[in-house]
Image: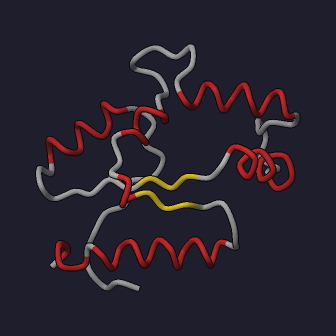
């Protein structure tokens, strides 16, 4: 793993958050998107999630998924689809398969591409 100082912000859900970060760190930030297909996300939520408030049906998952993407949300609300649209294609990491370790390996590979920037 990298031994360089950096900050990771997880769960950005509105473009305003990204714009604020860019304003405070011009030229010193990189936006990455971690994505998975709706089928994989639905399976993970319905089979593996046990937190209070997590979807318990396919219909509830789909309702929450639409909200997260920004459907029916105000401009200041959740807008994950708009956030992902701001990510350069080469900075999108797919999380459709494998274990957490496999995802960690893919993210590590992504970080290594930016190692010179972190010096």
Q: Position of residue 77 (x, y in %)?
A: 46, 22
Viewer-nearest residue: 70 or 85: 85
Q: Which residue does the image show at 22% across and 56% down from the upper left?
A: 29
Q: Is residue 47 above or below residue 60?
A: below
Figure quadrant of the N terminus = bottom left
Give the residue furthest to the left.
Answer: 26
Viewer-nearest residue: 93 or 68: 93
Q: Position of residue 44 (x, y in %)?
A: 77, 53
Q: Which residue does the image show at 24% across and 36% down from the upper left?
A: 19
Looking at the image, what colour scheme do you see? secondary structure
Viewer-nearest residue: 85 or 48: 85
Q: Is residue 6 above or below residue 53?
A: below
Q: Which residue does the image show at 84% across and 46% down from the upper left?
A: 46
Give the residue furthest to the front.
Answer: 89
Q: Is residue 59 above or below residue 80?
A: above
Q: Which residue does the image show at 57% across and 19% down from the upper left?
A: 71
Q: Give the side of residue 47 with respect to residue 67, left or right.
A: right
Q: Position of residue 110 (x, y in %)?
A: 39, 72
């Amino acid at each position: 793993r990298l031994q360089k100082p950096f900050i990771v912000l997880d769960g950005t859900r509105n473009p305003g958050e990204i714009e604020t970060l860019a304003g405070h760190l011009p030229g010193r930030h990189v936006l990455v998107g971690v994505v998975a297909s709706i089928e994989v996300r639905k399976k993970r939520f319905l089979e593996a999630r046990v937190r209070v408030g997590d979807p318990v049906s396919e219909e509830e998952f789909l309702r929450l998924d639409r909200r997260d993407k920004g459907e029916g949300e105000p401009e200041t609300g959740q807008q994950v689809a708009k956030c992902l649209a701001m990510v350069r294609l080469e900075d999108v990491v797919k999380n459709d398969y494998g274990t957490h370790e496999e995802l960690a390996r893919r993210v590590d590979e992504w970080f290594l591409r930016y190692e010179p920037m972190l010096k």
